[in-house]
Structures are given as structure tokens and as C-alpha cells.
Image (cartoon, rainbow, N blue to C red):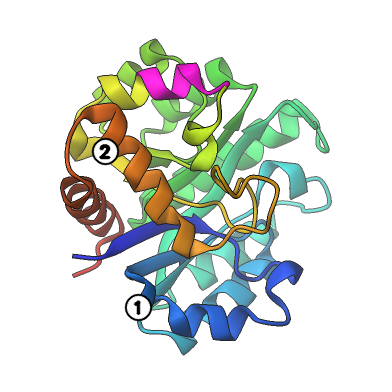
Amino acid sequence: MGLFDSHAHYYDEQFEVDGDELLKSMPKSGVDYIVTCPSTPEQSRESLRIAERYPYVYAAVGIHPQDCGPYDISALEDIRKLSKHPKCVAIGEIGLDYYYENASREKQKNWFREQCILANEVDKPVIVHDRDSHADTLAVLKDTKPRGVVHCFSGSIEMADELLKMGFYISFTGVITFKNAKKAVEVVAHMPLDRLMIETDSPYLAPEPLRGTRNDSRNVRLVAQKIAEIRGISFEEVADCTTENAKRLFGIR
């Protein structure tokens, strides 16, 4: 079984020149599945157009907390309509970001809550962004009770346990290869394999030894290798379980 990059951003302008060539190469590079995740309704449409071109690429639709500021609630209907596309597998990425705070915390929480409710209505999982907002992220998830994954996990073991009790999956990026990633490494070692997912967050967060370069889905292999090292298991076991987990969550057969 190949690898599943559960979170990338192929609408990004960094892929404008060679994105098509890159995506065509993925099966030969051992990447069997990719989910491309937008931040706005416009990017949601582009993500779906990308997914239409490759049988192994899927898309989420949603509004990111950093980008929710200009949108009023009418944009939720755009997301609802886009969620019916056959290549749409999730509502995301959605959540809270208290690092940049491009939108007020209250507006972020309102958009997060409304999109979680929408996900339940259309029977799609959520892909959650949580940056410096752990307590409020958990509060919204506990209140709305969607199913889904917290991507690029940066919380504690205690937060991970709360998410696992709620049935959530937890996903890790190349950050786990960084020297200062002690907390994430502890969570990787602690959590059950059947709730673990991997991602690149391309074009961001390239793993060591490629840190600082443009990331792409081929590098999800390095994330899997690091997890195998942390857990003391084979690369093949990590590849198999994380791919099955992502396929299960996103309803891919």
C-alpha cells in the first residue's frame, strides 16, 4: 500500500508552474492519495477542479479562520453546495487561529461552529486547524460533535486524549522531524495507531533535511519514516495504518 497525504494545498501559487507535473508523478513516487485543503470558497472551487483531474486527489471545502473575516454567513451556502461534489471528502480546513488573529476570535468561533454544524448536516468529517487556541477548539468540538481530524497537531497528550475520546483522528506533519518538536513526538509515541494520520501541509513545513524548501506530497514519506522510528515499528506498518485510517475517515474505498 502507498502513502496518503491527508493535507496539502495544491491551489497555492507556489505550484502554479509545475503543479500538474508534480501531481501526475505521485503514484510513481508511492503516494496513492492526496486531499487538497482550501481556505476560502474560491479556493474550494479550485481544489475541486484539481481533484477532478486526478483520480487519486480529493478535496475539502471550507473557510479557514485566518480568512473568514471578509465573509458573511451567506458564504456558508456556497460551502454547502460545494460539499455535494463527488470529489469532496471533508469540510476544511476550519478552526481557530489565535496566533495571527486576522479575524476576531468571536468571528472565528462563529465560523468554526457553523461549519462543524454544516459538516454534521452533510455527513462529512471536518479538518481542523488549531493554532494557539487549544481550549476553545476543544470547546467548539465538544459542543457541535463532528467527526474528523485535527491536522498538524501541536497540543498536549492530555488534549490528544480528549480528542481520541471524541473519536477524532490526529495528523502530523514534517514538524515532527524538527529538533524542537518534543511535545509532538511524545503524542506520536503515546496515541493508538488506528487514530494516526500523516500529511505534508504542502507547500509549507517541509521536513528535515528539506526544511525551508517548498514542500510537496512526496515528502510525506519522511513523516512516515519518522513515526516508524519513534514507534519502533516498520515503515510499511506506518504506511498501511495511516492510509487505512485516512481512507476510513474520508470514506474512500
The residue carrying pointer 2 sits among few (fewer than 14), some (14 to 19) or many (20 or more) residues within 10 Å by Cα, namely some
In the rendered image, the vertical position of residue 245 relative to residue 90, given as above or below: above
Please provide percent x and percent y for residue 137: 53, 25
Please name the residue shown 81% across and 45% down the image: 69
Please name the residue shown 30% across and 61% down the image: 3
Q: In which quarter of the image is the C terminus?
A: bottom left
Q: Can residue 142 be seen in this view?
A: yes
Seen from this angle, which residue lies furthest front? 209
Q: In which quarter of the image is residue 179?
A: top right
Q: Which of marks 1 and 2 is in front?
A: 2
Lateral position of residue 88 relative to residue 65, left or right = left
Which residues fall within the magenta stretch? 180-186
Q: Name the residue under label 2.
A: 228
What amino acid type is highlighted by mark number 1? Pro
Q: Mark 1 points at which residue?
A: 27
Please name the residue shown 63% across and 76% down the image: 46
Magenta-colored segment: predominant secondary structure: helix
